[in-house]
Amino acid sequence: MKKLVLISFAILFSYSFSYSQNFINGVIVYENQSGETLPLTGVTVYWLNTSLGTLSDTDGNYKIPLSSSSNKLVFKYLGFKDQVIEITDKILYNITMLNDENILDEVTVNKKRKTIQKSYFKTQNIINVSSDELLKAACCNISESFETNPSIDVNYSNAVTGVKQVKMLGLESPYLLITEENIPMIRGASQVYGLSFIPGTWVESMQITKGSGSVVNGFESISGQINVELKKPYSDTPFFVNVYSNNMGRNEVNIHGNKIINEKLSTGLYLHANKNTSINDKNNDGFLDNPTSNAFNIFNRWQYINTQKGTVSFLGIRYMNDDKVIGENTEDVVFIRNPWKGEINTNRFDSNFKFGYVNPSIPYQSLGFQMAYSNHDQDSFFGIRNYNINQNSFYSSLIYNSILGSTLNKIKFGLNYSYDDFDEIVDKKNVFYNRIDKSIGGFFEYSYDSMDAVSLVAGIRYDIHNNLGNFFTPRIHMRYQPYEKSVLRLSLGTGRKSSNIFSENQNVFATGREIKISNKSGKFYGLDPEKAINYGLSFRQGFFINNREGDITFDYYVTDFDNQIVVDWETQGELSFYNLNGKSFSKSLQIDLEYQIIDNVLLKSTFKNYDVKKQYNSGFKQNPLTPKNRFFTNIEASTNEKENGSKWKFDFTYNWIGTQRLPSHTELVDFNGNSPSYSLMNSQITRVLSNKLDVYIGGENIGGYTQSNPIIGGDDPFGADFDTSLIYAPIHGALIYVGLRFNN
């Protein structure tokens, strides 16, 4: 009989004579077959006969204020008997909980923390992705880390830069709010390449929120939010190295070094470098399949913790240089004209400071402040077309958290300030575009945070923006849980977006298309800003089949644009930007199935259907290069871990991508307006040799499927019909990689 070991430490403070200001916190763990104690996530902790409760976090930690109406603390977790503890003053409790005899051992004994976690208790539709999940993908940056995550779609933006972009709910990444520890990060000048600038090994976890996010982080979240949490010097391993190499000539190394200086101060130095000097033209179209590149990334982070005073602070400084060379293969071909070449050189500097205070005697009362500065400088040319952009950004936020009467009623309010200075040089004529965006916004958010049937998060913010005007952004999220393993979520919210049409659509520069802007009186290249409303529902149902756990989730979200900047690729030889005159919407249906097939084997399958349409000048049409249907399945398996930590890990992902509508082009008539459907397979095998060392080998696009005509008009790259942007499938064959990870 396996045992759940519940360790709770009663920490009673004397800061106040009020009994209600004291609290209990602790760590909840369970004992596996080997006798190891592991943290247990999502344990329900509440005072008997009250609605005052909490949940244990991913590390098994919980914190709950003492109740004035009850002295009995209840711990509930599926598969174990409920445990009731009578609390007496200043007593340390070591509690052993036995498995429920009515549930077979397989339900709990072999339970391990999932790398992708969903909660039945959170009000918002949030998916937590751990660092272990990121290790399943091919190496090395955030844009490559979503191959095993069904909520995010990944595609190449064009046939020459090798850059992957993400979509969510059928919409491009500019409609996502991408933050780094809740600081807006991938936006403006960094929109296209920014995700590739964050090494995957630096990431501690990610939170993916579907639908309109919280009002706390700003007004730009329309289809969802991706928040990236970085490694913390205090908790990260003292030394880590990752080495990676693939058959396309790409070589990468990541090195982390962390040092705890004293009990309060720690620091970390994080290095990343990659280099690719190989000339690859496997499809023999005369153009490099992937750019040659050099990149260097350095990040120094400081962390200060004072548990007695309830303060924590971070200071971070980062510099990055990335240089890509693209274009025709000049080594194997003799040219009678000037070759089409390009270069994208990016320098970026970031600095940030974060400070948090939690009242030691009132744990639900806290204050947070953060500020960040960044300079993003990109100099690039594509053939005879230039694109340079320099963006200076400053962001600050002040947030106060408290409760109203009890922990059931929580409030947040605060202020945001943002400043962006854009300088752009565009196209052959070197047209200058300069703009400053400034905004200050105040927000209030109320949460009814109950673990009973109903919970609620409702917020509103008001922003004063020099180019967007003054406006309200309301958002609401509701959760209804009729049964223990059933949950229904509803969300509704509005969003606004200050557009950067050139930085968000840099693939146009690697074409011969003429850029046209239908100027109005707007402040964004003569265009008006974008407005949208997002609403949706999500239903999740857990189940047991053959005494093994699983769940099925239905997500349906709609984004309606009140005003949108239309990016029109429908006319051959042109790219037009204009404000929407008619309807534009994105409807997304996603069905997820997750099931523990046998011990240590987890199956995840997803079906997605997109209906994304808008009014173009040429008619009401499906959004181009957006699959109508997608199917995804992932199998994750491992052997039992030995005493020294050694084991095997296996991961296999299958993607089926349905047909996509293609913009009109004379060289695409054979497709009858649609791309063919195709399948992709990725796999990785990891041999964990010990707790310190593992090696891995894997492959992307194992079947070797490639688009037959990724570059149109390549024989005349300076002509009007030249186009590298109509990409619906991979442009290179199978990619094989090997790597090694060491930590100490």
Image (cartoon, rainbow, N blue to C red):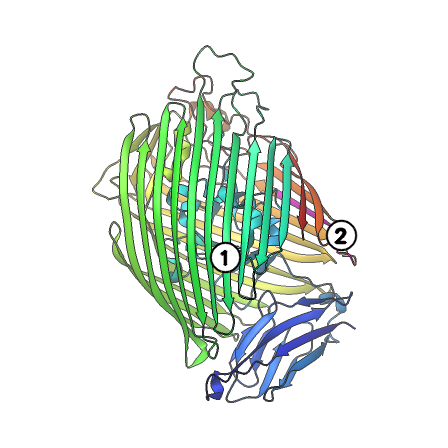
Question: Is 648 included in the stretch rendered in magenta?
Answer: yes
Task: Compute the Cα span from label 1 to label 2.
Answer: 34 Å
In this rendering, the answer to whether 530 lies above or below 329 is: below
Q: Earlier in the sequence, mark 1 or mark 2?
A: 1
Q: Residue furthest top?
A: 336
The location of residue 46, given as percent across then percent down, is 56, 79
For mark 1, does the 10 Å Cα neighbourhood hold few (<14), some (14 to 19), or many (20 or more) residues? many
In this rendering, the answer to whether 254 lies above or below 354 is: above
In this rendering, the answer to whether 47 lies above or below 290 is: below
State left or right for residue 152 relative to residue 405: right
Question: Is 159 included in the stretch rendered in magenta?
Answer: no
Q: Main secondary structure of the magenta part?
A: strand
The front one of 298 and 479 is: 298
**Quarter of the figure with residue 275:** top right
The location of residue 381, given as percent across then percent down, is 40, 28
Give the SS element for disc 1.
strand
- Please give the label number shown on residue 152: none
Q: Residue at x 74, y 52 (%)?
A: 690
The front one of 496 and 346 is: 346
State left or right for residue 306 relative to residue 419: right
Q: Which residues are magenta?
A: 644-654
Q: Residue at x 61, y 81 (%)?
A: 74
- Please give the label number shown on residue 302: 1
Could you tell me the amino acid type at mark 1?
Trp
The location of residue 6, given as percent across then percent down, is 67, 76
The front one of 620 and 485 is: 485
Residue for badge 2: 647
For mark 2, does the 10 Å Cα neighbourhood hold few (<14), some (14 to 19), or many (20 or more) residues? some
State left or right for residue 455 relative to residue 105: left
Q: Residue furthest front?
A: 261
